[in-house]
Image (cartoon, rainbow, N blue to C red):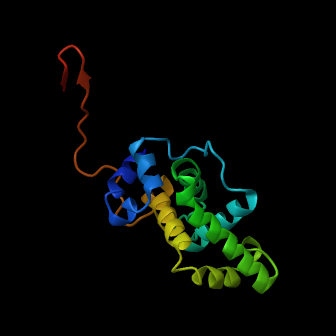
């Protein structure tokens, strides 16, 4: 079985990973990244917006999409439990602005808009800090999920040779 924590630790060395302190802290703390957030920060409306954004970024095709991989829950966990309030504020402000823009333009919030309207509204945020943070968390959440990792071309669950290593307490050595 894939271990999301190990995959994220490997990915965290990239410059994109280092830009997100919450993700970095979560990986270093070796938390269960599939768990529900202990500290709920998003309300239902924000959760719906985040879910719609994740689905736009990585929709299901002939492979699982972000929703199939549980990405919205992963993003919420990182934002809620591992980002400080100051670090997550650009995301919260961006979600509110995106929703307000949709209400002004189409008379409904982002989650209630048509796919075309959502795509247009989200594209207008591509240069924002909110979009950059959410996109990176969505992609990291997807590629480190079992559904995301196993659906990629060239997936090899066990590259090389497996050799079990155990600690021998009597000798104090690994064998």
Q: x, y percentage for residue 121?
A: 65, 82
Quarter residue 101 falls in: bottom right
Residue 36: name its quadrant: top right
- Asked if 169 appears above or below 86 in the picture, the reply is above
Q: Is residue 52 visible?
A: no
Determine whether, in the image, residue 115 is placed left or right of residue 86: right
Image coords of residue 103 (percent x, y): 78, 79
Q: How far across and down, in percent of the image, does residue 125 sit?
A: 58, 80
Residue 29: image location, x then y, percent: 42, 41
Residue visible at 66% across and 52% down in the picture: 41
Note whether residue 171 is visible. Answer: yes
Q: Is residue 98 left or right of residue 171?
A: right
Residue extending farthest top: 170
Q: Residue at x 21, y 13 (%)?
A: 170
**Is residue 151 shown left or right of residue 165?**
right
| 54, above or below 160, in the image | below
In the rendered view of the protein, which quadrant contains the N terminus? top left
- Furthest-front residue in view? 86
| Residue toward you, 52 or 163 | 52
Residue located 64% across and 85% down the image: 120
Q: How many numbered callouts?
A: 0
List the single residue furthest toward the right: 107
Residue 16 shown left or right of residue 92 in the figure: left
Quadrant where the C terminus sits is top left
């Amino acid at each position: 079985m894939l271990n999301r924590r190990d995959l994220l630790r490997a990915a965290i060395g990239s410059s994109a990973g280092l830009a997100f302190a919450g993700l970095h802290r979560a990986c270093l703390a070796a938390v269960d990244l599939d768990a529900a957030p202990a500290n709920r920060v998003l309300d239902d409306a924000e959760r719906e917006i985040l879910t719609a954004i994740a689905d736009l970024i990585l929709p299901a095709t002939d492979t699982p999409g972000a929703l199939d991989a549980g990405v919205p829950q992963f993003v919420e966990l990182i934002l809620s439990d591992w980002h400080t309030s100051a670090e997550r504020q650009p995301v919260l402000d961006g979600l509110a602005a995106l929703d307000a823009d949709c209400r002004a333009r189409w008379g409904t919030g982002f989650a209630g808009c048509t796919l075309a309207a959502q795509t247009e509204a989200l594209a207008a945020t591509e240069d924002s800090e909110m979009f950059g943070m959410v996109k990176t968390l969505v992609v990291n959440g997807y590629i480190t999920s079992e559904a995301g990792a196993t659906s990629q071309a060239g997936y090899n669950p066990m590259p090389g040779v497996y050799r079990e290593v155990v600690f021998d307490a009597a000798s104090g050595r690994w064998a």
